[in-house]
Image: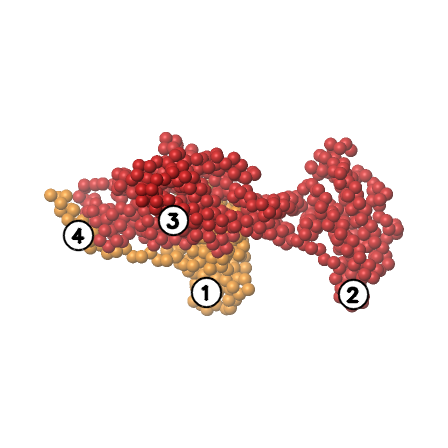
Amino acid sequence: MSRLALAVCLVLGPSPRAFAQASPPTAHQAPKTAAPVAAPPASAFPPEAEVRPFVRSYVDQYCGVQADRCADARALLAGYEDALGAVQACREKPCSFDVLYQISLQVKKLDLRAAELPFYPRYGHPLLRLSLLASIRLNAQAGELEARDGQKRSLPGVDESSASGIAKAVEKECLEDAALCPDLRTLYSEGMKLFSELAACKAAPCSFEATDLLVRRAGTGAAANASSRSKSTVLFAFLAQDQAEATRQLALLVDQRLLALSAGADKLSARLDALEKNAPDDPQALRRDSDALSEAYREASVGEDRLTFYLGYDKAAKRPAVNAASARLAGLRARALALMAARGLSLPPAADAAAVKPGASGKGAAPRAPQAATLLDARAVPNPAARGAPEAPPILPPTMNPLELMRRLASSDPVDGADVKRRLGQTATVGSPGLYAAQAYTQRFANTCAIATQVQVLRAHGLLPLNADPRAQEKELGDLAIARGFFDDGTPKNYSGELLIERGLLVSKINTGNLQELVEVFRRGHIAQLSVDGRYFWTGKDQSVPLPHAVLVTGLEVDRASGQVLGAYVNDTGTAPPGGGRFEPIEKLAKAMYGDMMEIQ
Amino acid sequence: MRAWAAAAALAFAACSRPAPPAPAPKGALQTAVERASAAPACAGKIPGQWSYSWPVPVARDGRALYRIFFFGRDGDAQKGFAFHQAEGDALLAVDGTVLECRRGAVGAPLPPNPPLRAALPFETRLPMEGRLFALTQDVGGLFASGRPLSDDEKKRVSEYVKLVFDLSETGHSAAYKASNPEFWIWAEKNTAVVPALK
């Protein structure tokens, strides 16, 4: 067989014919023990008659493509054959426990060397199948010995956390279920790669993007799915160890970013104090501080969301700290913008963080958002009264028809009630429903509601062009969300708002939100994205099961006399025409709420 | 003049209108079910926008647990949705802990708008759903206890079974049964009438 054919064979796997025509064992591959041996029963596992020729054939092929390690492979093969010969001899003439113990030790040493050989994922570590043969036969003989003399003794066990122990467990499962084998070998291979990359990052901390990618690789894809198929816990424990290490490194980065945020916010606050006293300032330095804070916030927030996704809200508990940092930054931003306006200062244009840091995304990381806004650019939508923003959309269509007026007057429907009160000037509108209503559109896909809410926010903030089709922007952002791991047939709750954070907007996420929390969001002058059961809003389509959906709550209508919240203005992309600033009574909103919400600052 | 009169009347009516009642809080089981897809056990397996089934009781070591299954949907609010067959499932406790979460094969879409179940107006369904969640916890406790049931308890089991099948898609019946066959055998023994699985 040519060298090329051997290489192809190793990558693609040999055909059944190749096994049938496998070269006869060479002299040193042949069992060293005498021929007339009592063969183990045909049902014995693993089937020796299949395993040994397979491994010999493998070593021949291995030598064809890995000449530099051929001698090692052949030496290992010879070592295992020796051990198996000794085992067979003990089957013929029972050995003492000490002899069995010594053979076990010899096999264990061979395993350590075998696991170090460069391997091909398609093949795994077939040499360890000989080790399995030897171990199983040795344990059986030790058991027979124990039954005879009644003395309980153990042979040296396999260290299941070592590379050889894990590889051996994989080979065992491969022998038990050949169909599962390719998945398990891929898992093992990916697990080993992750292990070495994590070790490198542990020695010299990696960038946020690289660490984030390691967490994703350790927690998703073939690894997570196939690990549940493996009967052995060894491989699962190994992958879990990778995941634990990856999340530990990311948690460390989140902690560091939170510390940087705290120190950076102190520094910015002091700078603003000086500005308030008319001290001269350097706009370039202000810009740099702002950029650094924006980046630290992004990494802390996205990192924490990644951790909550894989570990849960109880184990990744830094979200309150991230929310607090976000609130502080929002306060500083408002102060800075007011000061700059008062003093006629302007900042140099924001640097594109993704563009100025080549390689910052880390090896293999998905591209960042093309436009990374900085803290002082990503301003909140201003108070409509201050900017003359459009008035809130009418709760009900205006009418002067006295019959309709009388109907609304007599109606017990809360929408009618709120409409009447608003027309009589008995209510106040909080938030920016008029400004956001213009951004409402009907989402393009069945599962992109949370992307569509972000498109609207980004357009309202001027971070997406208004002259482009929002549905095309939704597709573009959806693709980006998939690449960054923020989307899987819908947006997981942990990743709501991630596309806003990536563009420098500040958000707070509330996992157990309620009406009171929603009102607080508007008291702070912000708006909210809310998870709801869509059935409450999509009348006429009486669906039989809950329909998880996300809407943008852009304003509240509050009774001036009692302070009672009568309802909320909602941008709902799930309907056609879209619900742009549609009024929903507060009772309905409370029932529809799924509990989690996001404050957009 | 007429407008003034109407406005005065509106003002009076608005001031005299009583405050709307506070919405009833959701039960613990409903909250747990709503948030199951966001639990770490379901991370990377169950998309947040998949719909979920009503919970089916499971008894484990004398403890009442609940199994739900998840499924995606096609379509939109205007044209209506076509739900898929079960595509994943989770086992959860009433405190919201998700003990197991699995993703299965992609489910084929169910036939759109099954005539029997979708005929219920939303306003009628909502109170039934609230009642179903309350009953599920109740029946789950009875199932886990393993003791003989009183006549009143048997009635509650009957009510639960009827509600599940009144409020679910016809095409999901087999998935409900597969969620915990032991429970349905128990329910059949303890109820006068168990609707046929369609």
CA separation, marks 2 and 3? 72 Å
Quarter of the view holding residue A434 = top left
Residue B10 visible at all? yes
CA separation, marks 4 and 1? 52 Å
- Place of residue A317 in the rendered image (x, y in percent of width and height, measured from the top left): 47, 54
Quadrant of the rendering where the N terminus of chain A is positioned: top right
Residue ID at (13%, 47%):
B5
Q: Which residue is mark 4?
A: B12
Q: Which chain is red?
A: A
Residue type at tag 2 = Ala
Quadrant of the rendering where the C terminus of chain A is positioned: top left
- Place of residue A164 in the rendered image (x, y in percent of width and height, measured from the top left): 70, 50
- Comparing marks 1 and 2, which lies closer to the viewer? 2
Q: Which residue is mark 2?
A: A147
CA separation, marks 3 and 1? 57 Å
Residue B123 visible at all? no
Residue B154: assigned label? 1
Q: Are marks 4 and 1 in contact (CB under 8 Å)?
A: no
Disc 2 with disc 4 on a shared chain: no
- For chain B, give the colour: orange
Q: Which residue is mark 3?
A: A328
